[in-house]
Amino acid sequence: MAAGLALASLGGVAGHAAQPVAATTAPAAPAAPAPQAAATPGGVSNTAPTTAAAKPTANPSSPELAMDGAPVMTVKPMIGQPTDGLFGLQPQVTKNGQFAHWMHNSILVPTITIISLFVLALLFWVSFRYRKARNPVASKTSHNTFIEIIWTLAPVVILVLIAVPSIGLLQAQFKPAPSGAVTLKAIGNQWYWTYQYPDNGGFEITANMLKEKADVAAGERGRTDADGPKLLATDNRIVLPVGVPIRLITTSNDVIHSWAVPAFWIKLDAIPGRLNETSFTIEKPGLYFGQCSELCGARHGYMPIAVEAVPPAEYAAWVKAKGGTMPTPGKASDKVIPQPGADGSAAKVEEAAETANATGPVENVATPANATAPATTQGATSNPAGAGNAGQ
């Protein structure tokens, strides 16, 4: 397989590859990943650093891996992407999105239109009926009880009618994922996305925006129309199954980002030190695009999201090709999903291993039962710092 698929064999880590060739070509030998620096402003490439902990692919020559760099699923007009000249929301492919689309078109827009036209008509009527030429002597009416009751009750009734479906939609958006859901962990970075599949063996994918052909360096792959629109195409797409609940977890390694795909009716903030969660189910296969929707720095506009929604059988084949595993059907997820930098995260495990290799084994000495705890100057605060850490 081409050099693009050789890069895919490095555990789904993002990297700019050469243009893909036919699937019958023999796979090139995978080279050891070299860490790259994260992007900085000022025209510097925004290629993400290589993930050292990523697992190698089980079958580098699998055609399923073509979905990483040489897309087999092409873009469909007006589906999953912004369209020039199109007025309205994108076609929705989730239950919540379809309900929100209906609520927007059938409730919010008519209500706003009627109120705006009514207020505009009142302004014209008052300007004409009570102009100075027609009313040289101004009315001294101080109030009208009937009118005051109407203009108090009418907005209340309108707000209640809008609140009923709104609260239902809000509740549905944060409904916990059921058993058997596929967990996708999206980690925001400046300025790229890292994805993990905890229920499928924990393999990791890093996605960078594909640059235009005029901007790529030698050996890099530029964007084509098959990859997606400008500023939305990525070198590595994530793959999710159709008809299967998706448990989305977001967090961040640096600043606040936001994982947003309009066709899924999803916008979930990725906050450092916090795990946010929501769930959704994709109902139609296709290629869907999104972006980071939280101002996160100089290259905020270069953090696209590309999702391929495929049938469950194709998803299982893709997971197997990535070196992952499929969980037991119907079994609830029991995977521990730590925050970046927390105990149990990949970075902490790797750091602990390096420390152990450098220092060697440490002998732990048991503390006698009657030993006196060390004195501390820590005041009566909620700070859990112990002796020697007062004031931190």
Image (cartoon, rainbow, N blue to C red):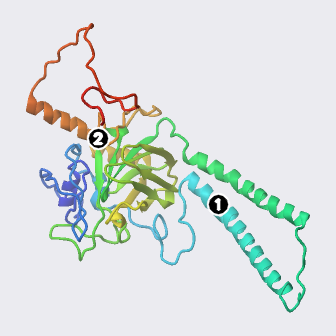
Seen from this angle, which residue lies furthest bottom?
A: 133
Q: Is residue 51 visible?
A: yes
Residue under label 1, please give it.
102
Residue under the image location 40 percent in, 62 percent down: 295
Residue 129 location (% of width, % of height): 86, 85
Left or right of residue 32, residue 42 in this image = right
Left or right of residue 20, residue 88 in this image = right
Q: Amino acid at mark 2?
A: Gly
Q: Nearer the viewer, residue 163 or 273?
A: 273
Left or right of residue 326, residue 10 in this image = left
Mark 2 secondary-structure assignment: loop
Residue 286's disc is none
Determine which quarter of the picture holds residue 53.
Answer: top left
* Real-space Cα separation, disc 1 to disc 2, in angstroms: 42 Å
Judge the density around disc 1: few (<14), some (14-19), many (≥20) Cα neighbours within 10 Å.
few
Vertical comparison of 385 with 243: above or below = above
Residue 341's disc is 2
Residue 364 location (% of width, % of height): 17, 18
Q: Is residue 2 visible?
A: no
Mark 1 secondary-structure assignment: helix
Q: Amino acid at mark 1?
A: Trp
Residue 111 location (% of width, % of height): 72, 66
Q: Nearer the viewer, residue 183 or 188?
A: 188
Judge the density around disc 2: few (<14), some (14-19), many (≥20) Cα neighbours within 10 Å.
some
Quadrant location of the N terminus in the rendered image: bottom left
Name which of mark 1 and mark 2 comes first in the sequence.
Answer: 1
Residue under the image location 67 percent in, 67 percent down: 109
Residue under the image location 60 percent in, 49 percent down: 170
Q: Nearer the viewer, residue 178 or 69?
A: 178
